[in-house]
Every structure is written in C-alpha cells, then in structure tokens.
Image (cartoon, rainbow, N blue to C red):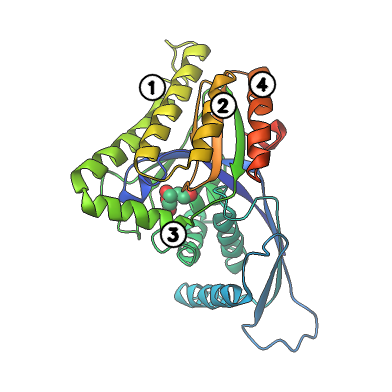
Amino acid sequence: MTVFTPGKLLLFGEHAAVFGFPAVGMALSRGLTATLSVPKNSNVAAGDLTIEINNAKAISESMIAQFIAHIKAVAVSYDLPPLVGTLHVTSELPIGSGFGSSAALCTAIARLLAPDSNEVRRTWRIAHELERFFHGTPSGIDTGLTTLGGAQAFRFDNTISDGHHLPTTVAVQLPDCVLTVGSIPRERSTKALVAHVGERRRADPRGVESLLARLGALGKTILPGGGAADRSDATTESNVAAFGKAATDAQAILRELGVSTPQLDEILREGKAAGALGGKLSGAGGGGAFYLVSADEEGSLRVRRAIDPIVADAGGIVFPLATLRR
Ligand code: MEV
C-alpha cells in the first residue's frame, strides 16, 4: 500500500500554538510517499517493521529502532494491528527543516496503521501521538496540516493546551499573492527550540505570554474579515500588503523570543529590499523554513534572485514557484 502526504508551511502561530494560541498554515504540494511492502511467504516475525528513508542520512539506526518501538506502542494504544514489512519512504521535503517532514511521516504511518478509517480526526490523532516521538509536546498543527491538507486556521478555544487536545480547524481562503519559500539548515531541533521558549516563559511568564498572544493574533490578519483576505471592502493590494506586514511583525516577535538566526534575518531583509511585502521564518526556527510575500510571480522572481545566493551559501534551497499550492 502506498500513501502520499504533503509537507506544510506554517504562516502564523508557530510556538504560540504550543501554548494554546491560534495558528494558520497550509499544506505544500511537495511531500512524502510511503510504501509498505510485505514480502510474500515472509518469515518476518509478527510485528516486525523496518523503515528505509531516502534522504535521512542524519537519522541513526538506533533512532529508527526507537521510532519503530513508538509506532508499535501507538498501534497497541489504538487497538490497531501492528505494521509488518518494510516501509520505503521517499521524501521531497528536506528533513528537519520546518516543512513538516516528521509530521508528514507520522500522517503516512497513521494512514497505513488505520487504512479503513474514514474519520480524518482519528487519523490526525494517531499521527499526533506518533509525532510525540519527535518532540514531546506537539501542538497538533503540523500533523493537522499534513493530515487535512489545504489552508487551515487552528484554534484551541483560548485554553492553554495540555498537549492532549487537538485544536478545532477551519479551512481558509488565503490572500491572492505569491510566496517565495525556502529553507536553510537548522542549528537547533524543534524539541530544543520549543524547550527554549518554554524556559523563557517560565522565567518571564507575563512578558512571554503577551508575545505569544500577539503571535497568535497576527494570524487573524489573513483570515476572512481580519484585514488581509476575502474582505469585500479591501483591495487585493491592501490584503497582500497587510499579509506581508503581519509576517514582518511576527518575525520581530520570533526574533525577540530567540528562535530566529542572523542568517534568517539577513535573507528576510534582502528579500524585502528586493520588493517583498514582508516575510518570516516558518516552523520552529533556528534556521529552517521561511517565506516572503509578493503580490505576483514577477515580484517573487525578483525576491528569489536576490536571496538565492545567500540561501545557497548557507547550504539551503528556495522552492520553485510551482511547488507551492494554495
Ligand atoms: C513546529 O513546526 C511548530 C511549533 O509551533 C511546534 C508545534 O506547534 O508543535 C514550533
């Protein structure tokens, strides 16, 4: 059985979502394909699973063995038969870059574990439980995007997430614009970055809580009626400008939280100097994914030309326009 799951691009609310504030993101057109092959007449012991990933040299065998043990535990907790055979994973997503490679893998495995489930929130919940392996307290937004697809707004109903409750979602229409999307290698893992924000919050609860609340609120800018999408009284131009400005404001807060890097800041600065209306990191930060907002393809190509050399120098990539689906 073969499944395809998309990667994701968080537009607003990363880190904020871990503490129960809203977020907005979209699925990418590139993603990951997972095929489970069960050899005929195999003498594989019941429950035996091996995983082969095309672009994961950085993932050690012992880590894969631990992940397999976690998959088995999640299958047991959901009363599902174990996965048996070899899971071949081909990913178009740079691993650990903020494009949801681990979330896409978890969604793919959730689909393989419960192929008959036509209840999408159940698949999402299983993927969410699997994702705990990669960082202990996922908010659920990454696996939400890789499971549901499209563009989604997430709400935690203003309660502080305890890590067990998945948010509610609404499919959203994004402002009509073009995003230049890329990533550079990361200096720190999602787990370390989430822990860093948690420490900052413990040291300064009121200050950090207000930054997180502002991060969450900025996502509203691109929701219907929020100032940057689908507003009958707003022009497309003002919608896109509001989106860009909100992205730049969010980036300033993420920098203040200590999850940006000088290289990311430089790429975003150069992109804006080349005409982008704004931009920010996407995902946990520490390097990784980013996006810049332009009104049209021409603008995006100018941005791309300006940032390409810096991104290449840093060992990163900029996606071709066609790989983004809104
Ligand atoms: C990582 O892509 C997004 C974070 O908000 C973590 C999470 O929501 O689980 C940093």
**Circle 4 crowding by C-alpha within 10 Å: few under 14, some 14–19, many from 20:** some
**Location of residue 292 with respect to 35 vertically, above or below:** above
**Residue contact at pointers 4 and 3, CB within 8 angstroms:** no
Nearest to viewer (mark 3 / mark 2):
2
| Residue occupied by mark 3 | 191
**Label of residue 179 in the image:** none
CA distance separating discs 4 and 1 = 30 Å
Question: Which is nearer the eye, 219 or 181?
Answer: 181
**Circle 3 crowding by C-alpha within 10 Å: few under 14, some 14–19, many from 20:** some
CA distance separating discs 4 and 3 = 35 Å
CA distance separating discs 1 and 3 = 34 Å
Would you say 98 lies left or right of 297 here? left
Q: Quarter-wise, where is residue 289 in the image?
A: top right
Q: Earlier in the sequence, mark 1 or mark 3?
A: 3
| Residue occupied by mark 2 | 270
Residue 326 visible in the current orientation: no
Nearest to viewer (mark 4 / mark 1):
4
Q: Amino acid at mark 1?
A: Gly
Q: Earlier in the sequence, mark 4 or mark 3?
A: 3
Q: Residue at x 42, y 53 (%)?
A: 193
**Location of residue 233 with respect to 72 vertically, above or below:** above
Q: Residue at x 32, y 43 (%)?
A: 21
**Label of residue 302 in the image:** 4
Q: Residue at x 36, y 54 (%)?
A: 196
**Label of residue 225 in the image:** 1
